[in-house]
Image (tube, helix red, strand yellow):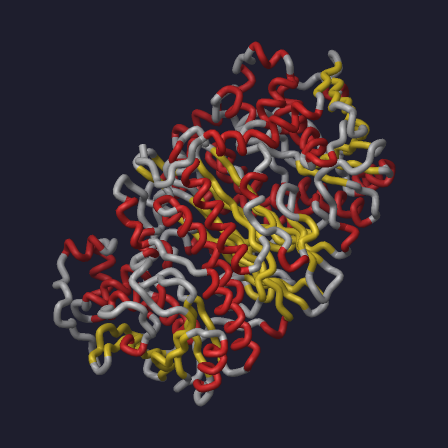
């Protein structure tokens, strides 16, 4: 049996092949695999499955170097989501993925469907979603287009999660000119299950039926995977039809139906029809099970008449699943789906013949040998060379940059940094999210990490997303280390033991040597940190081609970190809690200033070496901090990161505007350091804690060889923030600091007169 062209299909030409994103070599590889010219449908199938988004053809060899195993890892990379055991017979499934290109041209639907897709990845593992997070990057808020993108993305995330009844509990938002024309929208989901409820997307059982369930298939999202595998350009807005349209109400029904199916015993596998739709879900399940499959597209439930096999296979219509059921159980599967008002139709079966076959009634429109459609995709090993611009920027002596006259008052610099959109409160965004639905959120957005209680257990999970793309640009290996280490510190500051990560690797065009160098080195740094911190990689997403005619985004390997909080009392807030508590610094201040938010915000400079990151010291710091937290000695803890020590302490005072507390801080012990490096440098491995038992905190630090010192005292609600720097006292009323921190983004967004439609891209 062999595929034949359909009447009306276009003739395969070099121009048509190029339009589908295949190189000449890749097309020749396809012809050699088939032993003939492909049909139009086969060309479409391969263009999707061999796209960067689906095949990872430039990244797979490097991904294999990441640590993926630990006794608590139940499922690592290669499935819809990673799964770790958390004790008490419970497990959590989690993953982070990108929806960058769709969000750049249609921010609301791009972000909304990104949330929908990551939810499906988690509940197809058998886990009920309990938390959503996100990691967002935009250009400057001075741009009308950026404000339009920001508002649309935030509303898309909020509307979809809120309708699903899944709390959005945390994340991060960064504003930097590097993301001006190519925003990054990364969505993370965490779900809860019992260990025995884990199900994998592996087709098995000769004769078992393949069933399409959920929403009907339309023409939206066709070639979405290919769109995600090309640079953005001035013509990208014309590709809005490739952006999927989400329906969270249907997704809610699909979630409940899928979990009921999984627990019913009537199915053996389930897979989200995500990127490349029916094509990828059916081909990947067959490849994992090393079996053949046959699909008849005429049996696919459709919502539009006249759809061709090409369109049906490549549609990325949302809220759909592909199920392999037990033979003879088709009726029970349909009954469960009907209960939830969803379609379920048998469209194929698992076969012994080692082929992937698609028919349109009696006509074979696509046929590939064995699992080679998935396993024979090309793999590339591009050249790697560091960018001369990064080398020159890293070598610059940033201490030689003259201070502005205003900087004679360090409190002017502090207020300026607190008002920088990357540092300022993101409450304008996260107040649009329901962060407490289901009543399990112990700590929501605005702190170091979110903490979500696990029903049926005394345990909770601490969750964070993190990355500083500027660091990765300046020195990729160090930046990769810091991304993991800072995510781990955030989780530890909230009382959680870091346990595993998922990652979303956002980079430019891998065919450019400087981009592939960034990718290779960042992964090496991530690997070093994951090994030292015992946080294996359980899966994630690679998003390449994040660039436009203006250039590539900063290399941004976003880390989604999951930690375990053993007792409710260990959940630790960011804000100071009680007047009279001692303020302690764990870790050491340095004269490092390179790559800092201070340099960017105050001087418009991206230069200098990023701060050093010693992963052994990071591990010791986390161990010491958790020992002190578990001993009941820590009232609050806050990671020292963007903006440096002064910003960290100020945030501890003002992050909770309704319960602000002042502080008196003495930093005279470091008077030999340059003042701006001491206050605003971003040396790693530092945490500010408040405690009623400083001796116990010091003992925990000393036991792990971590530098620790008392640096001040928490004040009352009427006290200011006072710094003693050795050359005098600097007193900042809290109201002024709070206004800079809390009012900046709402003021920009309300004054920006947000356009109803996207303004022209510059």
Question: Where in the figure is residue 156, as x and y percent of width and height?
Answer: 46, 50
- Total marks drawn? 0
Quarter-wise, where is residue 152 in the image? top left
Question: Where in the figure is residue 321, as x and y percent of width and height?
Answer: 43, 70
Q: Nearer the viewer, residue 359 or 674?
A: 359
Q: Which of 664 and 735 is in front in this view?
A: 735
Residue 364 visible from this viewpoint: yes
Question: Where in the figure is residue 352, as x and y percent of width and height?
Answer: 36, 84
Q: In this view, does 412 lie above or below 69?
A: above
Q: Residue at x 40, y 66 (%)?
A: 273
Q: Where does the N terminus fall, quadrant-wise?
A: bottom left
- As drawn, is 282 to the left or to the right of 22? right
Q: Residue at x 78, y 29 (%)?
A: 717
> Which residue reaches farthest bottom?
328
Q: Where does the C terminus fall, quadrant-wise?
A: top left
Q: Which residue is drawn at 41% across and 58% down?
A: 246
Q: Is residue 463 above or below residue 514?
A: below
Q: Which residue is drawn at 19% across and 67% down?
A: 38
Question: Where in the figure is residue 525, as x and y percent of width and height?
Answer: 53, 43
Quarter-wise, where is residue 519 in the image? top left
Q: In this view, does 387 lie above or below 67?
A: above
Residue 686 visible from this viewpoint: no
> Which residue reaches farthest top?
405
């Amino acid at each position: 049996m062999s595929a034949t062209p359909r009447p009306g299909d276009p003739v395969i030409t070099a121009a048509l092949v190029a339009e589908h994103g295949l190189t000449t070599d890749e097309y020749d590889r396809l012809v050699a695999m088939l032993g003939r010219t492909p049909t139009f449908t086969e060309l479409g199938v391969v263009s999707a499955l061999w796209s960067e988004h689906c095949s990872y053809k430039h990244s797979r060899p490097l991904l294999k170097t990441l640590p993926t195993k630990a006794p608590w890892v139940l499922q690592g990379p290669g499935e819809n989501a990673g799964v770790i055991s958390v004790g008490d017979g419970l497990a959590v499934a989690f993953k982070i993925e990108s929806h960058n290109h769709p969000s750049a041209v249609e921010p609301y639907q791009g972000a909304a469907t990104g949330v929908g897709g990551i939810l499906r990845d988690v509940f197809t593992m058998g886990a009920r979603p309990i938390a959503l997070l996100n990691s967002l990057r935009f250009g400057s808020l001075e741009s009308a287009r950026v404000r339009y993108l920001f508002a649309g993305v935030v509303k898309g995330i909020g509307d979809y999660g809120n309708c699903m009844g899944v709390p959005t509990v945390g994340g991060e938002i960064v504003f930097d000119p590097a993301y001006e024309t190519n925003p990054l929208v990364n969505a993370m989901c965490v779900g809860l299950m019992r260990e025995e409820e884990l199900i994998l997307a592996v087709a098995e059982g000769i004769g078992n039926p393949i069933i399409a369930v959920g929403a009907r298939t339309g023409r939206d999202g066709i070639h979405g995977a290919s769109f995600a595998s090309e640079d953005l350009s001035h013509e990208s807005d014309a590709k809005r039809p490739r952006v999927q349209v989400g329906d969270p109400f249907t997704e809610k029904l699909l979630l409940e139906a899928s979990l009921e199916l999984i627990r019913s015993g009537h199915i053996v596998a389930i897979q989200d029809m995500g990127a490349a739709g029916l094509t990828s879900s059916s081909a990947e399940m067959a490849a994992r099970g090393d079996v053949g499959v046959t699909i008849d597209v005429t049996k696919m439930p459709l919502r539009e008449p006249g759809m061709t096999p090409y369109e049906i296979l490549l549609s990325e219509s949302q809220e759909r699943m592909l199920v392999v059921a037990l033979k003879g159980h088709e009726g029970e599967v349909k009954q469960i789906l009907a209960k939830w008002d969803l379609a379920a139709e048998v469209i194929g079966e698992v076969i012994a013949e080692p082929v992937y076959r698609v028919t349109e009634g009696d006509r074979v429109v696509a046929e590939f040998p064995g699992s080679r459609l998935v396993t024979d995709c090309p793999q590339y090993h591009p050249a790697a060379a560091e960018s001369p611009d990064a080398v020159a920027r890293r070598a610059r002596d940033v201490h030689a940059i003259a201070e502005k006259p205003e900087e004679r008052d360090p409190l002017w610099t502090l207020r300026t940094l607190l008002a920088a959109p990357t540092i300022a409160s993101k409450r304008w965004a996260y107040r649009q999210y329901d962060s407490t639905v289901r009543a399990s959120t112990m700590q929501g957005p605005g702190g170091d990490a979110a903490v979500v209680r696990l029903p049926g257990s005394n345990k909770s999970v601490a969750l964070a997303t993190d990355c500083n793309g500027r660091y990765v640009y300046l020195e990729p290996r160090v930046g990769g280390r810091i991304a993991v280490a800072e995510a781990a510190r955030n989780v530890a500051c909230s009382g959680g033991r870091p346990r595993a990560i998922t990652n979303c690797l956002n980079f430019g065009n891998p065919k450019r040597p400087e981009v592939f160098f960034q990718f290779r080195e960042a992964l090496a740094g991530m690997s070093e940190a994951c090994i030292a911190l015992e946080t294996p990689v359980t899966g994630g997403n690679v998003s390449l081609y994040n660039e436009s005619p203006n250039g590539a985004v900063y290399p941004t390997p976003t880390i989604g970190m999951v930690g375990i909080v053993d007792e409710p009392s260990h959940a630790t807030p960011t804000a100071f809690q009680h007047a009279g508590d001692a303020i302690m610094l764990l870790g050491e201040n340095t004269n490092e200033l390179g790559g800092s938010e201070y340099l960017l915000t105050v001087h418009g400079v991206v230069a200098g070496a990023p701060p050093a990151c010693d992963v052994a010291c990071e591990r010791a710091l986390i161990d010491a901090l958790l020992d002190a937290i578990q001993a009941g000695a820590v009232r609050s803890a806050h990671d020292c990161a963007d903006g440096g020590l002064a910003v960290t302490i100020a945030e501890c005072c003002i992050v909770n505007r309704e319960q602000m507390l002042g502080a008196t801080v003495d930093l005279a012990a470091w008077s030999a350091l340059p003042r701006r490096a001491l206050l605003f440098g971003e040396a790693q491995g530092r945490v500010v804690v408040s405690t009623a038992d400083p001796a116990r905190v010091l003992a925990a630090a000393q036991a792990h060889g971590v530098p620790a010192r008392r640096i001040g005292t928490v004040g009352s609600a009427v006290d200011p923030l006072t710094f003693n720097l050795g050359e005098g006292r600097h007193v900042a009323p809290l109201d002024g600091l709070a206004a800079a921190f809390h009012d900046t983004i709402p003021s920009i967004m309300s004054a920006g007169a947000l356009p109803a439609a996207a303004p022209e891209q510059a």
